[in-house]
Image (spheres, rainbow, N blue to C red):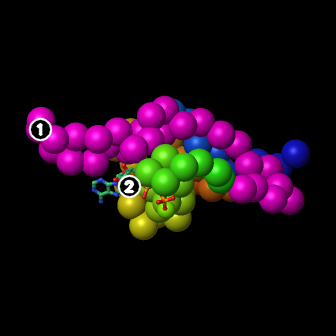
Amino acid sequence: MEIVLQAKNVRKVYGIKGNVYTALDNISLEITKGDFVGIMGPSGAGKSTLLNVFSTIDKPTSGEIQISGQELETM
Ligand SMILES: Nc1ncnc2c1ncn2[C@@H]1O[C@H](COP(=O)(O)OP(=O)(O)OP(=O)(O)O)[C@@H](O)[C@H]1O
Ligand SMILES: [Mg+2]
């Protein structure tokens, strides 16, 4: 199956110095062509943060995200 989105060890940490919050803690997933994916979780779980880094609205603190094999960082 063709992988359209691959995320490896994605972390997103908001804030600086003593006031930091880890919104995404090592998220890895693969989405293959034709998948219909829902993201569920309570308020504050990090759903919007995840979609923001997948859509390049925001940058992950670390980790890799590829869309159709291309690293988002290189776009
Ligand atoms: N810009 C920001 N600066 C600091 N913390 C943030 C920021 N954006 C989100 N957060 C924090 O990151 C965590 C995840 O937030 P996020 O908005 O991704 O959750 P969510 O799952 O989309 O919640 P909801 O269901 O309420 O939309 C929350 O604790 C939130 O307070
Ligand atoms: Mg949200």
- In the rendered structure, the answer to whether residue 23 lies left or right of residue 3 reads left
- Secondary structure under tag 2 reads loop
Quadrant assignment for ligand 1: bottom left
- Whether disc 2's CB lies below 8 Å from ligand 1 is answered no
- Whether disc 1's CB lies below 8 Å from ligand 1 is answered no
Q: Position of residue 2 (x, y in %)?
A: 82, 49
**Boundaries of the magenta span:** 10-38
Question: Which residue is the site of mark 2?
Answer: 59
Residue pictured at 16% horizontal, 41% vertical: 19
- In the rendered structure, the answer to whether residue 14 lies left or right of residue 52 reads left
- Secondary structure under tag 1 reads loop
Question: Which residue is the site of mark 1?
Answer: 17
Q: Position of residue 8 (x, y in %)?
A: 56, 36
Residue pictured at 81% horizontal, 59% vertical: 36
Q: Position of residue 18 (x, y in %)?
A: 12, 36
In front: 40, or 12? 40
